[in-house]
Image: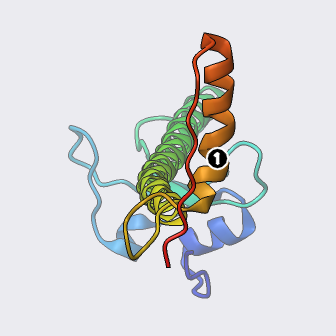
């Protein structure tokens, strides 16, 4: 944000959004030369830069005026084309910067998502291992390490079904150890 509290021609042009003619450049700023000519500039235009789609100037362009040309419609048209070209370039550069920032933000989100997915996968693996351990503990007697009643209740129906399918005999023994 520009500090526009001063009354410099640039500040006024930006604040008011209007072009300002500066006369007497030599008296005001000393000799200012442009191009191959020996004589210093006498006049300049301070043109506010107002990007398309906005109402407020975001900067100003100071255009030194030739001492050898009349400021007629053709010269004004030429200067307007310079300002429009510069404004278009600045607008394009700004849009490009915004797009780059947006892409960087998306890349950061993608990295965060990958990191989150990796942490989630690690957590899921750890959880699956814990569940497998709990299932093994739930089916095993902690003192003897032998299958317990829960294992019996889960395995007996499967073994009975397999014996029926194959027409094989099945021997079942239940021992209660205390």
Along the line of sight, the residue nearer the viewer: 52 or 27: 52
Residue 17 visible, this angle: yes
Along the line of sight, the residue nearer the viewer: 83 or 63: 83
Asked if 154 appears above or below 82 in the picture, the reply is below
Dividing the picture into quarters, in which one does residue 22 lie? Answer: bottom right
Residue, far bottom:
5
Tell me if 166 is positioned left or right of 96 in this view.
right
Asked if 101 appears above or below 144 in the picture, the reply is above
Residue carrying label 1 = 154
Position of the N terminus, as image quadrant, is bottom right
Residue 63 visible, this angle: no
Asked if 168 appears above or below 149 in the picture, the reply is above
- State the residue at coordinates (21%, 37%): 36
- State the residue at coordinates (55%, 29%): 78
- State the residue at coordinates (55%, 76%): 2
Q: Position of residue 115 (x, y in %)?
A: 41, 54
- Check the image and tell me how it is coloured: rainbow
Classify mark 1: helix, strand or loop. Answer: helix
Label 1 crowding class (10 Å Cα cut-off): few <14, some 14-19, many 20+?
A: few
Q: Position of residue 176 (x, y in %)?
A: 55, 68
Q: Position of residue 15 (x, y in %)?
A: 69, 71
């Amino acid at each position: 944000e520009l500090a526009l509290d001063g009354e410099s021609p640039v500040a006024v042009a930006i604040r008011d959004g209007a072009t300002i003619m500066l006369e007497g450049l030599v008296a005001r700023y000393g000799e200012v030369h442009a191009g191959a000519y020996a004589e210093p500039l006498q006049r300049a235009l301070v043109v506010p830069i107002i990007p398309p789609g906005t109402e407020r100037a975001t900067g100003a362009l100071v255009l030194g005026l030739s001492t050898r040309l009349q400021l007629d419609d053709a010269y004004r048209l030429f200067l307007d084309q310079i300002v429009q070209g510069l404004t278009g370039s600045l607008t394009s550069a700004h849009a490009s910067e915004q797009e780059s920032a947006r892409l960087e933000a998306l890349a950061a989100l993608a990295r965060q998502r990958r990191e989150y997915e990796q942490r989630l996968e690690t957590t899921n693996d750890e959880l699956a291992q814990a569940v497998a351990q709990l299932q093994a503990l739930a089916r095993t007697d902690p003192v003897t390490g032998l299958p317990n009643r829960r294992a019996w209740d889960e395995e007996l129906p499967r073994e009975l079904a397999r014996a029926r399918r194959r027409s094989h005999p099945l021997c079942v023994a239940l021992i209660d150890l205390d």
